[in-house]
């Protein structure tokens, strides 16, 4: 714990020119002085928990393994992680806390999913950031997810096949105004 009572890990690199703060972002940001950070690069939760709401909600019947076990795995959250829930990346107050610690003219880079990028961008802009053109992390792995429909007359059909290949991870680029 630091002097403020916040449990966080700080590591410095490059002769103290770079500091990595590990901990709850809202708690850690609150302990930092205003206008003290040159840039923020972050990868907030993507909030891809819609399947958890359908199959893993408290009190819901346990998800069945099925032929592939996909429903059971998906009910545990994105990649089996419950931390991806909530909406912290969609709250302007989150980004206002980041804006407070950034130096005037400082940059923010925030990774997002293609589904959540719009909501996150609006929250960041509402907090006071100047929005710049996005950066894209483009990759060749991944494939559209689809589920076979097992019902009379629908053999061979798939639901969700209209999804695009998830081959891009958008990165919001914003700047704290100078004045």
Image (cartoon, rainbow, N blue to C red):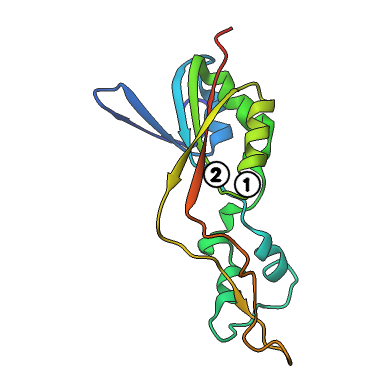
Q: Identify whether 55 is placed above or below 29.
A: below
Which numbered tag is attached to residue 90? none
The single residue placed furthest to the left in the displayed view is 15
SS assignment at label 2: loop
Q: Nearer the viewer, residue 16 or 164?
A: 164
Q: Does any portion of residue 104 appear in the rendered image? A: yes
SS assignment at label 1: loop
**Res. 149 image quadrant:** bottom right
Residue at 68% x, 71% y is 55
| Residue position marked by numbered label 2 in the rendering | 112
Q: Are marks 2 and 1 in contact (CB under 8 Å)?
A: yes
Q: Measured from the top left, where is residue 69 in percent x and y?
A: 55, 80
Q: Nearer the viewer, residue 12 or 117?
A: 117
Residue at 58% x, 49% y is 114
**Res. 125 image quadrant:** top right
| Residue position marked by numbered label 1 in the rendering | 116
**Res. 17 image quadrant:** top left
Q: Measured from the top left, where is residue 34 in percent x and y?
A: 54, 15
Q: Identify whether 139 is placed above or below 100.
A: below
Q: Does any portion of residue 5 appear in the rendered image? A: no
């Amino acid at each position: 714990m630091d002097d403020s009572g916040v449990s966080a890990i700080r590591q410095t690199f490059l002769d103290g020119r770079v500091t990595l703060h590990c901990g709850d972002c809202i708690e850690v940001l609150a302990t930092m002085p205003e206008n003290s950070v040159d840039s923020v690069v972050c990868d907030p939760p993507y909030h891809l928990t819609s399947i958890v709401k359908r199959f893993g909600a408290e009190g819901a019947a346990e998800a069945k393994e099925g032929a592939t076990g996909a429903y059971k795995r998906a009910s545990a959250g994105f990649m089996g992680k419950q931390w991806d829930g909530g909406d912290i990346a969609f709250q302007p107050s989150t980004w206002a806390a980041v804006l407070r610690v950034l130096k005037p003219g400082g940059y923010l880079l925030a990774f997002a999913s293609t589904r959540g990028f719009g909501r996150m961008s609006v929250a960041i802009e509402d907090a006071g950031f100047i929005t710049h053109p996005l950066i894209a992390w483009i990759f060749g792995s991944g494939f559209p997810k689809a589920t076979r429909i097992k019902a009379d007359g629908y053999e061979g059909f798939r639901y969700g096949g209209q999804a695009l290949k998830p081959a891009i991870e958008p990165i919001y680029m914003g700047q704290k105004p100078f004045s």
